[in-house]
Amino acid sequence: MKLKTRLLPFIQNTPGLLLLNLISSLILLLINQLLHGLSEVLLGLSGRVTISSGDFTFLFTSWQGWLLIILGLATVLLYIAIDVNAQFIYCEQLLSGEKPSLLRSFAQGFLSLKKYLDPRGLIVILYLTLLSPIIGLGFSVSLTRSFYIPKFINAVIEKNPLYFTGLIVLTLALLTFAVIHCFILHGALLSGQSMKESGTASRKLLRRNWKNFLWEMFRYFLTTAVISFVGMLTLFAIPILVAELLPVSKNVSLFIIMWFSLLSALFVILMYLLCPSYLLMKTILLYKKYSTDEEWTYTAKAPRRRFMIPVVSGVLVLALSVFSLLGVAYADDVFPSEITPQIVAHRAGGKEAPENTAKGLEVSASLKAAGGEIDIQRTSDGKYVVNHDDTFQRVAGDPRKSYEMTLEQVKQLRVDGEPVSTLEKMLEASRDKLILFVELKGETADRQMADDAVRIIKEMNMADQTVIISLKYDVLAYVEEKYPEMETGYLAFFSFGNIENTPFDYLALEEEIATPGTIDAIHDKGKKIMVWTVNNEDDIESFLLSDADMIITDEVKMSLAMKERLQNRDTAERIIDMIVQ
């Protein structure tokens, strides 16, 4: 089949798909606002402002919590009705040649929710909302499309051969399951089958056509990759290179760079919006082909409204030109040169020194990091030593926990040749050099630890150079209430609600939930935000270019070097980085 024939269903139906995605997004936005408002009311009645990783058990112990769970489940169903069911029905209308109807698609999308009311339907819901985003294969809902296993958990899995092998096996099993049942929604939503019937039919279709299916999917993804590459090459890379080589004034060059950077950003947004719909259309075409005895082909539509192409193109060129002129005129304000986020060394020194040791803080200070983060735990005789894990097995080869050992026993251990440090030694090592973020860690993180840590910090006159942080909301709230003079930082890896209204001075958020909107909301409340644990090079660059106050990282040298490089960019580089990010 010729490339033009293969691409025709996608090209001709792009306007309809854009309209569907636009209307769907607006509806979901309105639903989100309504449900978010109801959630805030329920949270307020429970005396809380947020649900987060350190304070979520009330969901199962209060009537407000159970209503929030029900509200969450209702939200998932609404997203499935609009993001999945209506998409299937509308795309099938586009491909069948009938006049598509958004209203009818949404109505049938909601009516089709009854298809999920059996055990197989619940498994499909679980896959759409959680498993598909994690493994990166199949259809999903926009509510959880960016969901992934937190990187700090992934880091633990990758370092443990048993966990890593288990993850690989589980991922392969899920991939196989997804491929075998890839047509389950097609049968249920387009052919009127039950989930049980469509699951059986999907397995039969794949058994008969698996070679062709894999080939078609490979060809589809290769075509998508080539289009994306060529699009970015022609809309971004080549024009930017030409703009820098042209013998024109600086402002003209910046205008061209700005114009094509905006155009390429628009291209990326459109691809992000359309690719899930294109994939859905491709699978519908294959489903129709495999389900009929005859070769099913798409019937091309007669071109309509050709006058819209020059009109839309003209409006686009004008809009890009206006924004580009404004961007050049106010370049220093719109694309500031200063990189404000500071670098905090994870576990005292990151990868530059033995973890959670005084040596790590010394190295971090010598590298000009702004701070160091450490983890303290209590010994059996009431002293405080620095260690991240429950035991000393990984770092020192001792399987005992801190509270099973005396201070003297802990002092006999070595971490890559360095002694296990006490809280006092870490405070002294950071004095007048670093902000020390002291995490109350592990099973012994309680009010006694909070009281003792504050006492030690004050005895060493380090209150103004120390921040007490914790994953445990109740323990940190106790510190904030009893010792308001101490700065506190709440560590969270998931959050729903208004986390900016929590009483803490710092919000330390895992990468996924540290969105620009959340960062702005935290700053509006006069608080600071840290992002953890940022180790990937692209992520480091992204958060250095954000409005975060600090990033916690193991890659201290890389982060500091990148910060210096970004600080020295010229205006053209700042424009490109800001728009690409």
Image: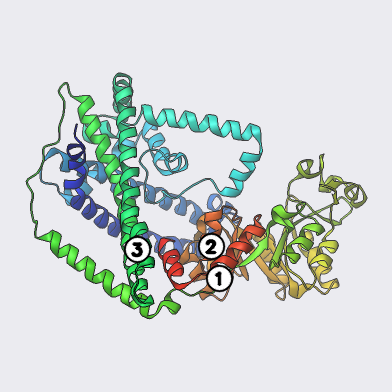
Residue for point 77% across, 73% down: 463
Q: Say which label, 2 or 1, has the lower sequence index.
A: 2
**Can see residue 47?**
no
The residue that label 2 is drawn on is 543
- Find out whether the residues at labels 2 and 3 contact each other: C-beta distance under 8 Å: no
In the image, what residue type sits under mark 2? Phe
Q: In the rendered image of this protein, does residue 337 appear above or below residue 383? A: below
Q: In the rendered image of this protein, does residue 562 appear above or below residue 194? A: below
Front in this rendered view, residue 70 or 150: 150
State the residue lying farthest toward the right. Answer: 408
Front in this rendered view, residue 79 or 227: 227
The residue that label 1 is drawn on is 567
State the residue lying farthest toward the front. Answer: 247
Residue 1: image quadrant is top left
Residue for point 33% across, 56% down: 269
The residue that label 3 is drawn on is 242
User: In this image, 154 relative to 136: left or right?
Assistant: right
